[in-house]
Image (tube, rainbow, N blue to C red):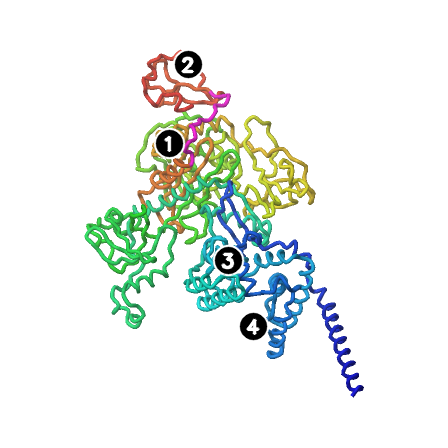
Amino acid sequence: MRRVLSCIMWLAVSGVCALVLTLVGIFLYLDPQIPSAESYRHLRLETPLRIFTSDGQLIAEFGQRRLIPLPIAEMPELFIAALLDTEDKRFYDHGGIDLITLANAGVSLIQHRGAIRGPGGSTITMQLARNISFTLERTFLRKFKEIVLALKIERELEKDEILELYLNVIPFGKHAYGAEAAARTYYGRALDELNLSQLAMLAGIPQAPTAGNPINGPDRSLRRRNLVLTRMLEQGSIDRAQHDSAVAAPITASVHGRTTELPAPYAAERARRQLLKRYGRRIYTDGFEVFTTIDPRMQSAARAALTNGIHGYDERHGYRGPEARFATDLEELANSASEFPSIDAYWLSAIAAIVPYRDQLPAVVTRLQERSFAALLSNGAEVEVPWEGMAWARPHVDANTLGPRPRNAGDIVAPGDVIRLRAVESTRWRLSQLPGVQGSLVALDPEDGAVRALVGGYNFNIRQFNHATQAKRQPGSGFKPFVYSAALDHGLTPASMFTDAPLVFDDANLEGYYRPGNFGGTFQGPTRLRTALYRSINLVSMRVLLEVGADNVVSFVERFGFDTSQFPRNTQLAIGGGTIAVTSMEMARAFAVFANGGFRVDPYLIQRIQRDNGEVLYVAAPKRVCRDCPELEPTMQGISVSPNHREAPNARAADAGAAHPDATENETASGPDQGGEAALPTPEPRAERVIDERVAFIMNSMLRDVVQRGTGSRARQLGRRDLAGKTGTTNEADTWFNGFTQNLVATVWLGFGDNRPLGDNEFGSNGPLPIWIEFMREAIAGESEQLPPRPDGLVSMRIDPKTGDLAQPGDRGAVFEIFREEYAPKRKLSTQTPANLYDGREEIRPEDIF
């Protein structure tokens, strides 16, 4: 017997030794494959890219993981209790492994031949290791790795550190990682604003974040929530009354999108693309924060103005009918009729499948009255549309033709029609439709090119194409100022006379004669350059081009930043037609030259790039206008901040060969190759002067005449004399208004994405210009009127407006004109001017020119 006992003892000792040696061997084998526990202390959470306005308002967030880190001290105690009571009630007592639950898991392993089923005995520390370092494959080897790493984590980190990290990284489904992100995803509120039932619901999700969240698996999540509440009751974390009340509560979760403070999707997408090109896909996980140049007030005004202008065009061209027709009786549904208790229930179900776009809500017409109709919205509310909200809806025939005016509601809609409604006020509704026309608005600071507002289309969710930066279209008459400025640079003056009369060209490409004309088919005869511009006379522009020479004009307009490689070298150049194709951003940059006195600035959108820990990666250094500075060679447009220079905001360094974040696919930043070394501090980059300041001043005055006397006169309603700009209309599909003050340039384009004609009665003056006016009314509100400073080397002289010659003394019909000194008429007028010369007539007020 003693020998048997001795053998048993030696076998037990040998078994224990063998087990220990096996465990040590497994540890030595797995340890090199396992990350160090210390790395968890400095773990960088996968944080999405966030894009902000210039003053820090969030405009977009990009990234698969929606993660909002939260210190454990700020998490509700009830939520922590719910997690611990359900997932790991002995968390503060064990050293990373709970032997009791692990024993249960061991039995499960034997029963299922090494494959893990059920909870698996994982402590919170082990779950943390799995979520950060391992795959989700449920095998024995992975479980052993979890155990080894959990032991290492417990030796290096405090319990609260482990719990805080766990609560910030575990998945909750719907791309939400961490408790705070989950609260905002499912309830649209912060974690500390949730009630007990909602906290318990969240605490139950980590076991099965995809199948067990309240959206994908409401029944399963409800059972899990109630289990969490029961465990909390058993552990004494809540009392019976709290338990019963929370169990009785219904599911209130729904998916809440990532909240933004200011809608600017086109600007955000442009910034995202620029960052992706420079930094790669890590921008979605490494906590990148981008501060743009977008001004929130201007962006809001631009979005509202463009939306209203597009709606205005759409209504001018009639109602295209309902999007669809629903059955008006259950009998029409045939086999599906039994699914719905009433026709209203069917309508609600059907309308819920139609996507709402911003202020365009889908609805179904339910009943008609003589001058109104009722419609059912997807939220179940029935609203009434009055006659003034639908009287515009003449039938659309084509771009130039409308059907008869409606006499009653029945001429427009019928019960079962699927329509769109817009809320004009909180209680007033207007019949609407999704527009086919598109538009864009871009606003720049002419001093440095900062993009203050950018709207690239009607609705980003409908079409992501950015018409402000990607759509190359004919500029029409909006291009004439560049032809005229070339003429001034060539020696012509605003008083130069050209004949507005028919032109005939023998064009071999047309197998006949080309006879360009003016709008309206009228001719003015001899016309001054200034008058021809504000009246937008095509034939004068062509004669100016012939006088200066197409090659000279093309060479000159390159200074404004245009790529002229595809520009025509014929009379189409004079009217912005032919093969000229430019974007709204390019037009705004070009008009900024007139606004700032002759300097070319480069548009930029990104002001600063940093990490969520405050590390600054990039600060823009745009080329700025400096009127009194000596000319400098062009320098880099942006800087990257070296870690050694973060405390010195004026110290600038350049990435070797790195593209500027605002560069497009065909652009890179200018600047010296630094070979990977930090550059020495450089002078402030300065914009290059590209046209004579006197030419810029004269053009500014001529473009102000466009607003005061010409095709842009609708803008006089703003009551300012410092507004300048030019309309543009093409025969095909584009209308423009490009306008500016000393401090802001804004370009508006309106047209169809597929180049369809807008209609014979659509011009830059009645489509884009009202949009520009609405935007500028808000954008420059409170800003005092500011006329450009007059440079040296100019003279003002009285001329005869009919001939462009110097006026005779006492000529009461004379007007003032501005000339560069070297091109002024030779004979000087007397400095004494009769007091009654002005006679109160606007056309000879010097301030209108100066």
Residue occupied by mark 2:
829
SS state under label 3: helix
Residue 118, labelled with which disc?
A: 4
State which region is magenta. 779-794
Residue occupied by mark 1:
707
Frontmost residue, 230 versus 411: 230
Q: Main secondary structure of the magenta part?
A: loop
- Lower position in the chain sequence, tag 4 or tag 2: 4
Q: What whole-number distance in Å separates the C-alpha atoms at marks 4 and 2?
A: 101 Å
Residue type of the residue flagged with mark 2: Leu
Residue 533 spot, x, y in % from top left: 39, 32
Q: Quadrant of residue 529?
A: top left
Residue type of the residue flagged with mark 3: Ala
Looking at the image, which residue is at 32% across and 58% down?
A: 380
| Crowd around label 4: few <14 · some 14–19 · many ≥20 (10 Å) | few
Q: Is residue 507 visible?
A: yes
Residue occupied by mark 3:
182
Residue type of the residue flagged with mark 4: Gly
Q: What whole-number distance in Å separates the C-alpha atoms at marks 3 and 1?
A: 54 Å
Residue 782 belongs to the span the image colors magenta = yes
Nearest to viewer (mark 3 / mark 1): 3
